[in-house]
Image (spheres, rainbow, N blue to C red):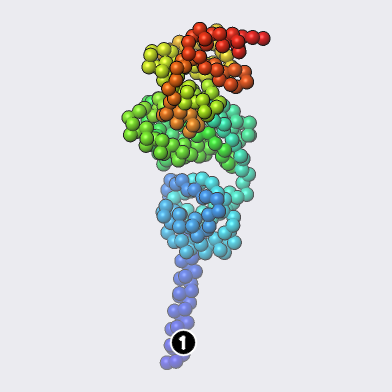
Amino acid sequence: MFYKSILIVAVIVIVVVVGGFGYFYFGVYGKIANPAPEKEFTVTKGESGKMIGKNLKDLGLIKDRFLFETEVWLRGSEKEFAAGNYKLPEKASIADLVKILTTAAKREQVKITIPEGLSNKEIAKIWEEKKIGMADDFLAKASVKDSREIIPGSTYDFLALKQKGADLEGYLYPDTYYVFKDSQPEDLIKKMLDNFENKTKDILAEIQSSGKDFHDILTLASIIEREVPKTSERPIIAGLFLKRIQIGMALQSDATVNYATGKYKLQPTYDDLQVNSPYNTYKYRGLPPSPIGNPSISSIKAVLNPEQSEYLYFLSKPTGETVFSKTLEEHNENKAKYLNNP
């Protein structure tokens, strides 16, 4: 009887051990047929394996946090997680997920700085200069009318406020980003849209409560960004442009003409001013159809809080200094003085 009891206990122990091993093995390494679509997942800098496991569980990418943490411990991968945005299969083994999230640390990252006010075309040029990919490929992705075409599963409420048919010009927030050397254009675009959403959250709420048109505000902000470099002068320029619109005067912005011609000159030529484009605000009154670049928060705030003044004209000296005028006569005198002299 005694030996029989020992045998029973031994069998139970073996079953538990084998069962536990099986649960662990198949839970960690088991493959699931018919993999589902991918989900966006973000690892922030300094995030622990325990927190990553929690986030994976909350997102439904794993069923058992303990198994994930155990696999991380067995691999010694706690400090190998790489911060970044990932597209993870909805149904993948825990082992594969750990591998994906840790091997990324060995991929080369590139620092890419996007100055304020640049157009999507100029950003695409930087993308190519950094040897990440071709400018045309980036521009094509940034030219979509619906971001879901390139970033499935991510929606942005602010993009619903842009005019129908407008692309992502104006909505890619200028900042410094880190992307992997083998990144696709949509990887950077998503980072920029996420940043825009985060930086403009309070401003957007203010605009919506006021009943103002967000797309128009962003369009004017993009013009101001290109017209004047000094943050302190932007509210004055905003008030000046809004006054022109109010009295039915053309905006006459050199920045919009440069956008239409692609020349980006301090002073467009006479021929430039004749270009037949809805972005030529010398020829067509009111705002152009969409932003001419991606503005900073300071320019957006300048449009929201314009400074009233007696000025109706301004010009930028070659030194970058802005000269304001009350009348056309005074403005022409300043042009002769600061721009037409050899």
Residue at left 56%, top 8%? 333
Location of residue 228 (image quadrant)? top right
Task: Report the residue at 45% width, 31% height from top.
Answer: 301
Q: Is residue 164 above or below residue 84?
A: above
Residue at coordinates 40% horizontally, 25% vertically from top-left? Answer: 216
> Which residue is more in the foreground, 60 or 113?
113
Position of residue 113 measured from the top left corner of the image (x, y, whole percent): 59, 35
**175 or 190: which is nearer to us?**
175
Quadrant that contains the C terminus: top right
Q: Position of residue 87 (x, y in %)?
A: 49, 45
**What secondary structure is marked by label 1?**
helix
Residue 194 is situated, as x and y percent measured from the top left of the image, at 47, 40
> Could you say which quadrant of the image residue 15 lies in?
bottom left
Q: Position of residue 142 (x, y in %)?
A: 49, 30
What kind of residue is marked 1? Ile
| Total numbered circles | 1
In the image, farthest residue toward the right: 342
Is there any visible trace of residue 151 in the rendered image?
Answer: no
Q: Is residue 246 visible?
A: yes
Question: What residue is pinned by disc 1?
Answer: 6
